[in-house]
Image (cartoon, rainbow, N blue to C red):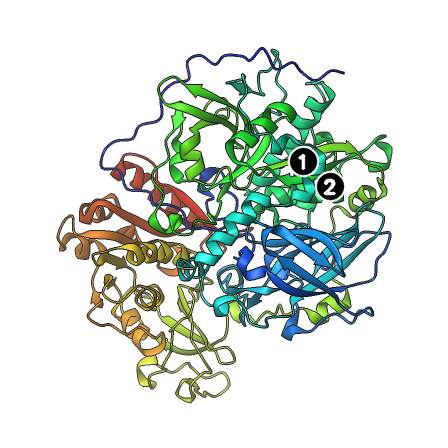
Amino acid sequence: AARPPLGRFGTRAGWGSAAMWPAGAFSLRALTSASVCTAAYWRLAAADLPVHCLAADVEGSWELTLGPSSSERSSCGHLRPDDPLREPLLAGGRRPAWGPPPLAAELLPGGVARLGGEAGSWGLVSDEALELRAGGREFLAFMGFQPLPADNGGDHLPLALQRRHSRCNETVLGWYRSLDRSAWGCWVGRRSDSTTAVDGSTGSFLQRRSRRRGSARERSTERALEASKFQFKAAAGDASARTGESDVKALDWRNVSGRNWVDPPLQQGRCGGCYAIAAAQMLSARWRVARGDAGAEGFSAAFPLFCGEYTQGCQGGYPYLTAKWSEDVGLLPERCAPYSEEGTCSVRCDAAALGRRYRASGHRYVAGGEGAVMDELRHSGPLVVSFRSDPDLMHYAGGLWEPPPLAEDDEAEAGFLAPTHSALLVGFGVDPEQGPYWVLQNAWGAEWGEMGGFRIGRAAARARGLENLVVAADVVADERPAVLEEVVRAAGSRPTPSLEFLALSSHSTSGVGMAGHRGEAVCVEQGGGEEEAIVVRLDLESNFRSLSFGDSAGTETAVQCLGPTPDSCRTARAEGGDLPDCAALADCPCDLHGQDLPFPGMRAMAERVRLMCSSATDPVRALLVGLGGGAISSYLVDRCPPGHLMLENVEKDARVARLAAQFFGFRPGPRNSAEVSDGLAAAASRPAGAYDAVLVDCFASADRVPEGCRSREFLTAARTLLRPEGLVLQNVWGRSSAGGAAVAGDFNATVAAYAETFGRPPAREVVFDAPASLEYVLF
């Protein structure tokens, strides 16, 4: 069948105007997450891997240790989908006990590689993974990262995603295959000219980015690599090299020759799977275009999303890696694995009975900027783009989306802008007043935006990195369908790593005590009247400390102290005896310098304030309601430059404030004051219009938010404190195994109070999502 003629493009009358919001509504700051993607209901920080490696970190001499090859593809120790908490890391620099000596490789600037004397190509997948093609093989592996001890304390203590450090001088266990997909194996890489992790690799992704701001070599190298990424993929077509203008000024693949060549918009829901949806829909549309058949059945997005080892399922991933997995493994029709946000790796079809099978081919980044992207889009069909999104996009209703300016930190590194969302690029056009724009289809349902899509000016899109990671791939007949059949047979199971992988893995968990708490109870602070007792717990081995109310299963605050547990913290009591009073014990010093925050909600709020104080010329003034153990306060004082932060901490419970100093390392000072007061009273007594941020980390027992920290009166007082660009952030649980239905009720009441106070519902960022627990930060 002939390709569709590109001469009759449907017009789209009545676009409507962009959504407008009342003056005085709370400000929405730029996002800080490194991962893709943004989901509906403000899932803006879905976490994939805690890795940030740029080209200059990876260039150099490497040794690749290859396992034996086989005709059967291996998961190489990864789960389906990949699990950031269960990566097959290599402990202590050890290599697997594989027979052949390592292969010497040189990764040179400009994407040039040499492997065993043969020329090849290499590149990075965003800042997360290394891909190499040389010696008749393709290699893929995630860059390494170092987990800190005691990284998992249950649903309420998801430490691992926050506490890992990049190790750009090594990879985790990865995959290799022959170019014809007949031989498969596992491999690991390590730099032979460097043995240290980049910059010491301490601190968060944002901190590592900040330390790189002055590296001219890195910026220039990254720009050079961006222009030449994966040139070995160009065999799939020469469209990426054509950058000339065309007579075609408008295109929308949802209406070409009067037909729609694109799948209907899916609703990704709470699953952060936009990257896989966009990649699968890109392949489906380009397959239809190549065949000239707009009615051809599309390919499943759920199959690579929930069964692929190259991405992290609903926790995030990259479209490039979805296309790569679809090339290695194959594609399934949509009917075989329909999309569901609660999906699992399961397949309804017998792959062997499907007849002719298909796979992706020539997965690649489209280099060359706007002209190359337009040419590829015109000649071969839709593409996938990733970009730095903004909560404002959720409110889009029509017209050209005009995103707010990027924060200074986002613009600091010329060679890299971390994407937070992926979408399907379906067309382009020119507005007579606002100029040229792109047309994208989102994964937020057909009722959102303009029939499930949105338009954005090309200049604004470029500023948010939309042209940096444009992904294309084609579809071909699968000449080795046995690979797909084997994966389908294994669907529904989570592969168990081999004994060798388990022996090499550096992942570890610490014991969790009674009621889901980590460590042992060391003392109790009794309450008076209706006050519940406070229990302090300590993990002596790791020096991890937590505080909870009464017999609640929820941990209200926690810190990871530096170094071994001091002897003064070790108490003894008779078996079955009562816990001693905390006030009767000696101080238990805690050094928090350089330590991360153990809860993702804490981290999400603190990182935004840290961004503000890092770029501010005048001191940032912030109010924290809910001191707890002082973890957020200590974190901000440790990381904000001297003189850039004035933090006022408020804690209603005097016992908690006293324990914060005794056990949790809180040290009040001129930049870090403490006050025992009710949140509403504290906010009402402070000067209006004087604060850059109000942070609310206020909990009672069982993860519940007290009425005084979520009422309209409190939020009105907090809003009054803000400067024009000020920000209110609140940590709240949407569901919790500790609080049950009461927690969900608190959440709904809090959201309603924000809507009444600020004139619209708050932005909601999902920072932790598990079957029994759902944690948000509200803006």
Image position, residue 765 (x, y; %): 43, 46
Is 468 in front, or is 182? Answer: 468
Q: Quadrant of the N terminus?
A: top right
Q: Is residue 404 left or right of residue 596?
A: left
- Which quarter of the image is occupied by the C terminus? top left
User: What residue is rendered at 29% in x and 48% in y?
Assistant: 728
Query: Which residue bears the numbered disc 1?
Result: 473
- Is 362 displayed left or right of 627 in the figure? right
* Residue 327 disc label: 2
Amino acid carrying label 1: it is Ala
Where's residue 328, x and y in %?
75, 44
Residue at 39 percent of width and 88 percent of height: 568
Give the camera-side residue of 316 and 90: 90
**Is residue 745 in view from this perspective?**
yes
Q: Are discs 1 and 2 less than 8 Å apart at CB?
A: yes
Viewer-proximal residue among 370 and 601:
370
Mark 1 → mark 2, Cα distance in angstroms = 9 Å
